[in-house]
Image (spheres, rainbow, N blue to C red):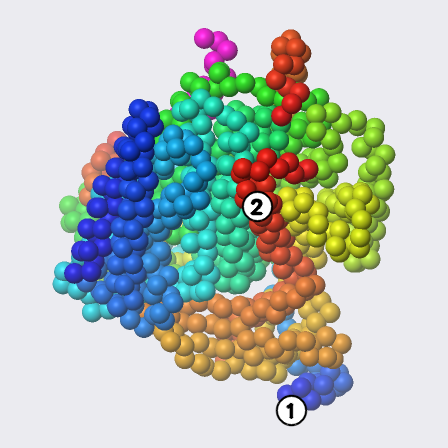
Amino acid sequence: MMKKLWGIWLMLPLLAWAQAQPLGDDPAVEARLKALSTELRCLVCQNQTLADSTAPLAEDLRREIRELIAKGMSDKEITEYLVARYGDFVRYRPPVKAQTMLLWVGPSVLLVGGLAGLWLALRRRNQILVDDNDEEGEEA
Amino acid sequence: MIPELGHFALILALLLATTQAGFSLVGAARGNELWMTAGVSAARGQFFFIGIGFLSLAYAFYSNDFSVLYVASNSNSALPVQYRLAALWGGHEGSMLLWATTLALWTVAVTVFSRHLPPVFKARLLGTMGLISIGFLLFILLSSNPFERLIPAAMDGRDLNPLLQDPGMVFHPPVLYMGYVGFSVAFGFAIAALLGGELSPEWARWTRTWTTVAWMFLTVGIAFGSKWAYYELGWGGWWFWDAVENASFMPWLVGTALIHSLAVTEKRDAFKLWTVLLAIFAFSLSLLGTFLVRSGVLTSVHAFATDPRRGLFILGFLALVIGGALTLFALRAPKVGLGGKFGMVSRESMLLTNNVIMVVAAGVVMLGTLYPLFLDALGLGKISVGPPYFDTVFVPVMMPAIFLMGLAIFARWKNAALPDLMTRLKWAFGVSVVVALLLPFVMGKWTPMIALGLLMAMWIITTAVVSLRDRLQKREGGMIAALIHLPRAYQGMIVAHLGVAVFIIGVTMVKGYEVEQDMRMSPGDNATVGSYSFHFDGIQDQPGPNYMAAVGHFTATRNGREVAVLEPEKRMYTVQSMPMTEAAISAGLVNDLYVSLGEPVSEQAWAVRIYIKPFVQWIWVGALMMAGGGLLAMLDPRYRRRNKTQQGDNA
Amino acid sequence: MKPAFKYLLPLAIFLVLVGFFAAGLKLDPREVPSPLIDKPAPAFRLPVLNAAGQTFSPEDMRGQVWLLNVWASWCGACREEHPVLMAMAQRGEITLVGLDYKDTDAEASGVLTQAGNPYKTVAVDADGRVGIDYGVYGVPETYVIDKAGVIRYKQIGPVTDEALHTKILPLIKGLQ
């Protein structure tokens, strides 16, 4: 029964009211809000993004961001607006500054350092094994 | 009465753990066989008494004994029985008891399945595990006693956190702990070898089976947790780079490195120090994870009651165990030989390179997880390091490892020729690039990340196919028969590697092509999301065992054909008056339809979030394939019969 | 001894980590320091509770050292600090202004008539917008604002007797 009804609705464009409306008014604003709020931390939650949280403060902040978008502020300006109030803590992507240098450079340093260390160790190892005349190396 | 029995059993278990450690280690040092045998008996006795303690607590939960403080804080008489039992590890005290019980289980498994080990070696292994057990039992008895009485008894319990009232809670923690704690065996092997000063290929072979089993549990446990978060948290994510997730991911990365490193140590008697160090790291990271979760030094979605005093105890224990192990390493390392020689381009060097990358990856995860703590401790401000950071940093680190994964299975031991490898793999490389470039166009959206993800997945798949073809050409008989007769270790390797490819496909597709819509829907409304149409049939109230639910009814259709009926729920748990969102998911090989009820927005209308998540199930299928590969490799006859010096042809 | 150094490296790194962890045990990872310290208190003009037509603005407090206490009738921890605030108000050491955050007037007045009113004025921030400007993330929060209208200190969570006597009052004495 339900399915039949549903079929009829599909065929009758007159009944367009049955088409659900997106929650936000403007899909473009919603998309920007979504992208922004996945990079922001919900302050009252344990560890959740603003996009995922249903806490009242998170809802307030989403409303605030919507309005800031409507005011024509850029994503960067909106992030700065929030950082001015809550500090860098709200950003899940820490800004690059002196204190976070190690955080951002660290991965490359670890990778390059690890591989370079490995290369040196292997080279030394081969030299030593050649010097030792390969006594134990051949058979395993 | 029974709780006191349980408490007493834990005290006896502590005494026996002390006996186990003392007799085993002193017996091994003096070569006294009687003492060493006593250590084995003590280990089994310890398991018996911890088991009694565990069962006593389980019984207190089962029988709703709210005169036990821990039961009163974590259970309720209206709670269904399976969750009453799972509530045992729903809080701090019980999960520590689960930790200790799991350790005892592994210890007793070692006594049963290690008859072939030299007695002195086995005694050192059991001694080490006994020392760890002492630490945990002391911790439980001194600061986290789950049997503490509540007088007068509570009328009813405060209930298990509704978030945890889920089948995931029944399986995820025990399986995860089997993995975490299982690395203690590899750790014990490493310490025993360092104490004895001998790191032989046999040592690697013994360690390998145990490590693989623990790693399989850890893989499945993490996958369970991820799947649980996916359907339970209501916003469809599957990995959040949360501190607690990272705490389980770091030992997994190092454990994966360890498995591969052990292969080389066994086969070529090389990287011995590195392998030992990895074995120490894997378990150290498990302990570190326990510390991070328990001490409250990091915030996490896994809200456990935290207590700095307990944190201090675990930290002290951590310092003792890991610090001791690393000191022993520093003392013994200079005396360990180098082992077999191999060229700069060889399977050994590639495996070792991948090993280093895995450890670097674990280091990167650790850096991101602990960085806020570092800054805070130095008084340099508070920051958050979250998914955007990890996504940016982790993928580039892992890429070379994925590339080498395809290459290494072709490289020969000792010495491989790069030009030869390149000619053999140009077909695989060409196909991968073409698919990666073209497939996104067919799918309707091309981004560099999607192409890159597909390239990595295809590279693993095509190289595996080429490798299989090479192998099968050498064999007689039909395809299937030949496949079955390949060495188990090789089959396992291929399956696990294909699992990585399947996992990458899942991640790439869901990140690239996921569709999400927040809709306002009244009964009778239709929402079109992607190529699907969702009809909201209505909502009705339905009582659950300990909650009231509003159950929505949605019919999903595609091209006018019904494909799924979805019933998301909004539950209100009565005891803690906590609302919970139960998403409805229609899982499929190609698409998951995911509907989650938000808040009512008017008399009739509800906020409804609808996702189409392509290939998301592949993420967990991939993880299970990795674990399955481990299982296959373990079944290789090489690891079951020790006396036969049978040489398999693969690592 | 030199060649053995590299084998000590893992131990050394680990010990540094342990040091950080030990320090970390004393820290609260959830307390977020305010970036507004030593910045001018954000301006606002809000209606005053139970005084139709009256408004309050931080401008009105120029030339005085005062406390802005963010509270609400629905907030449990606010009840904890309430006696401390009452005692402070009775001693009359400092002017206390309340910011009633996301609350209804009726319920807020109810609490104040029942438990006493420590505030000189209560400004009503019904939709929590001023709260966002002040970076409020958990109620209660208390700001110390100096004569020039600059925020000098922020207490996150309830004002305890200890915090009052070791931090807030000495600071205020200095400012006055």
- C3 drawn magenta: yes
Q: Determine whether B482 is above or below B206 in the image.
A: below
Extent of the magenta region: C1-15
SS at mark 1 in the image = loop
Q: Determine whether B564 is above or below B73 in the image.
A: below
Q: Residue B465, position in %: x, y?
A: 77, 47
- Tags 2 and 1 touching, CB below 8 Å: no
- B424 drawn magenta: no
Residue name at image x 66 percent, y 54 percent = B506
Report whether residue B464 is seen: yes
Residue name at image x 64 percent, y 8 percent = A131
Q: Determine whether B531 is above or below A39 in the image.
A: below
The circle drawn on residue B404 is: none
- C-alpha span from label 2 to label 1: 55 Å
**Which quadrant holds residue A94?**
top right
Judge from the rendering whether residue B423 lies leftward or rightward of residue B485; answer left or right: right
**Which quadrant holds residue A55?**
bottom left
Residue closer to the observer: B359 or B630: B630
**Residue that label 1 marks:** A1
